[in-house]
Structures are given as C-alpha cells and as structure tokens.
Image (cartoon, rainbow, N blue to C red):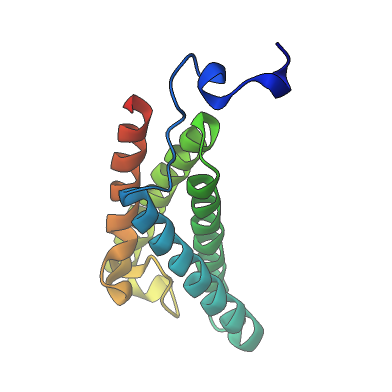
C-alpha cells in the first residue's frame, strides 16, 4: 500500500481524523476569522495614519491579527499537527492578553492608544480573553475524540 492509497482512517490507525472546524469549532473559526480581519484592519489603518502616535500599540494589534489568522488557519486545516500548533498559539494569545491587559491596567500611560488586548479586551466585550480559553478547551477535547 502506498501513501496515496491510504484512506484517512487507515492513516490514523482506524480512527477517523477529528475535524477541528466542526460543531463548536465552527463557531471558533468564525470568531477567529472576524477577529483576524478586525485586528488586521485596525492595525493597518493605524500604522498608515498614526504610526508615530503609538507604535507599540499598533504593532501589538498586528501581532494579535497574525496570531488570530494562524489559529483560524489551523482550525480550518485540521489534523493533529494543526491542533497542537493552534493549542500553542492559543496559549501564547492568552499570555499576551493577560500581560498586555495587566500592563494597561497598572500603567495606562504606557500605551498612547488601545490595542486589541488592552484592558483584557474590554473594547471587544472581553472576547479576546474568552476566545483563547474556549479555543484551548476545544482543542484539548479534540485530542481525545
């Protein structure tokens, strides 16, 4: 049997591969997709128009957009490698939200303008802090499925 003759079930030891973008994963794909576009659009416009005003905030928003985009791609792609990569990125995202959120609360003058992760995502209804937790729960569940 060649690699091209294998069915997905045969390649995974008789189990069907778990599709990360189904069920609750579809909602995560939607949220991450929306946040990718929102954060990327915001950071691009801000960097073009006012980069000198708050470069750190705008670069952090661009980093958030890249993380959101990678997680969206991983959820859509599926597979164990994508699941593990998305899990690591969700952890990094949560760390970023917690660090930037704490930083903006302790030292508000550190950022001349808000980022996606400022005040733990308060400007986005706290979704930036809820999303990685939900994502990690889904991705951990996907491993056992």
Q: Nearer the viewer, residue 131 or 14?
A: 14
Identify the image quadrant of the N terminus: top right
Q: Quadrant of residue 41?
A: bottom right
**Is 32 positioned to the left or the right of 59 in the image?**
left
Q: Nearer the viewer, residue 30 or 123?
A: 30
Q: Position of residue 138 (x, y in %)?
A: 32, 41
Q: Position of residue 89 (x, y in %)?
A: 47, 44
Q: Nearer the viewer, residue 84 or 10?
A: 10
Identify the image quadrant of the C terminus: top left
Pick out the residue farthest to the top: 1
Pick out the residue farthest to the bottom: 49
**Is 130 positioned to the left or the right of 67 in the image?**
left
Residue at point 53%, 63% (across, down): 65
**Is 48 positioned to the left or the right of 130 in the image?**
right
Looking at the image, residue 125 lies above or below residue 72: below
Q: Position of residue 71 (x, y in %)?
A: 49, 50
Looking at the image, residue 11 lies above or below residue 94: above
Q: Position of residue 130 (x, y in %)?
A: 27, 56
Residue at point 55%, 26% (across, down): 8
Q: Quadrant of residue 16?
A: top left
Task: Give the tally of numbered discs.
Answer: 0
Residue at point 36%, 34% (across, down): 142
Q: Is residue 106 visible?
A: no
Q: Is residue 71 visible?
A: yes
Looking at the image, residue 85 lies above or below residue 49: above
Residue at point 31%, 76% (across, down): 123
**Is 69 positioned to the left or the right of 49 in the image?**
left
Q: Quadrant of residue 4?
A: top right
């Amino acid at each position: 049997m060649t690699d091209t003759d294998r069915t997905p079930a045969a390649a995974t030891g008789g189990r069907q591969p778990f599709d990360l973008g189904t069920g609750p994963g579809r909602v995560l794909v939607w949220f991450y997709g929306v946040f990718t576009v929102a954060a990327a659009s915001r950071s691009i416009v801000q960097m073009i128009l006012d980069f000198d005003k708050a470069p750190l905030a705008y670069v952090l928003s661009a980093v958030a957009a890249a993380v959101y985009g990678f997680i969206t791609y991983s959820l859509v792609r599926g597979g164990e490698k994508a699941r593990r990569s998305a899990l690591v990125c969700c952890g990094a995202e949560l760390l970023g939200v917690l660090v930037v959120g704490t930083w903006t609360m302790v030292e508000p003058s550190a950022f001349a303008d808000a980022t996606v992760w400022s005040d733990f995502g308060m400007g986005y209804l706290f979704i930036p802090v809820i999303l990685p937790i939900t994502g990690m729960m889904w991705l951990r569940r996907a491993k056992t499925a």
